[in-house]
Image (spheres, helix red, strand yellow):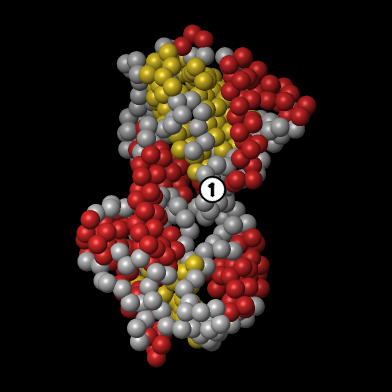
Amino acid sequence: MTASGTATPCRVLVGAFGRPGMRDLDFGRQVVDYLQELTWPDGVMVEDLSCAAPLVLHRLQELRPAKVVLLGAVARAFDPPATLRRYRLDLTPPPPDAVHRRLEESVMGMVDLDHTLAIARHWGGLPADTVIIEVEPAEAGFGLGFSDALAGCFDPILDMVREELGDLAVGAGQHRDLEDEEVSALHAGTETEVLRSVLPSDGMTQLVEYARDHARACQQRDRSPALLDGAWSDAHGVTIAGRVRPWGVFVESGGDWFDAVPLDGDMLGIVVGNVAGRGVEVAPTMSDLRAAARAYAAIDGDSPVRMLQHLDRLAAKTGLGRQARVLYLTVQPASGEVRFCRAGGCPPLLIGRGSSRGRYVGLAGSGPVGDSAGSHRPVAAERLEAGSTLLLFTDGLVESRDVARAVGLRRLRQAASDGPDDLDDLCDHVLRTCTAELRRDDDICIVGVRLHAAPVPARLGPSNA
């Protein structure tokens, strides 16, 4: 918060919204970090409002500002990327069913400008003089930092805010203007001597550090060869790439995971699972179940049925993992034989070498872990050709409250068919494409398993990051 003194009443509130880890959708939060380090007149407060809409409403009712200016990146899809829109808000309350839906989504963790506006308009938390400044995002998928298209929006937004302050604008937002290449360096996370020389405060330094850390984390998490905690095994001819995306803000671990375990006879066991629930609340349960699955794979991993039966008995005796969805798969690289058993969840997608369209295999699944039918789980078998790929994934990739699983499965098959050949790039492409039109409300895990003609060591090990 920036204010000249705690006793000064709030005349104008400048607030912004962002969604961490969502590329351009986090732009508003990064802009307000910048604005907070500038000098503003008495009575002007600058705050990050990236929290649940009821909390924002409470803050508005507490401050009772005469004017509100709200900033954020909002995908409207009718303007080119980086388009700035400024408009005065119509305070007519939305329909009650829309408010109820927005309130439910807000309580479940959805944070954005539209949710706050709907709830604040319903309960009368905004003054008549409320102005919205939006920017159309260029990249709305998962990732860190923001796109090149938005890098030049800092100063135009600052100018708009100054204009909205009117008579208060004298001396508002004083700073040394950054050259285009300096803004680009800030956005890209590079730390240059010229950028050091223009930083107006420690706060701007923190913003540079934040952008640079984002870029580094993005490279380490998204572009590394999949299994980060892995070790080389004796299994040859199989390459694995995987991605896990927990649900929630500032969440690094959730309920989805994957694992690969070397077995006797150069076989490989692969687990993909998600526990009941989502986000950080279920991360401890996920960790325990992942360890149990790895131990059972080491004991009885050559049999997918026996592997899942061990988890069924564990759930029956202790409750651990009950209602979890787990797929366990064994690969024999020498023959290309794949056998798997599925306790709930989604069927794997098989993409043949040079095939224009994949197909789902092992459609006959069974109930989740601990289900009464656990002792009768069907086993599916496939023989993979060299160069073919299996995509294993959890429900969060293909469905949400707004998207039916059947629709998501069609999108996934099309995305995989149109994707690049490199396995790492394919996982990135599928994740980005499938979530572009999916309002996320669950954790996501996707794993690619590819069989090669020539022996290729597979990097193995547990991962939930």
The image shows residue 366 at horizontal and vertical percentages of 66, 30
Residue 171: quadrant of the picture:
bottom left
Residue neighbourhood size for the residue with mark 1, other residues' Cα within 10 Å, grouped as few (<14), some (14–19), many (≥20): some
User: Which residue occupies 72% across, 22% down?
Assistant: 375
The residue sitting at the right extreme is 317
The image shows residue 339 at horizontal and vertical percentages of 54, 19
**Label tally:** 1
Q: Tell me if residue 338 can be seen.
A: yes
The image shows residue 154 at horizontal and vertical percentages of 33, 69
Q: Determine which residue is flagged by label 1.
A: 251
Q: Tell me if residue 326 can be seen.
A: no
Q: Amino acid at mark 1?
A: Val
The residue sitting at the top extreme is 265
Secondary structure of the residue carrying numbered label 1:
loop
User: Which residue occupies 61% across, 14% down?
Assistant: 299
The residue sitting at the bottom extreme is 167
Residue 35 to residue 235: above or below:
below
In front here: 209 or 231? 209
Residue 337 to residue 81: above or below:
above
The image shows residue 262 at horizontal and vertical percentages of 50, 17
Residue 150: quadrant of the picture:
bottom left
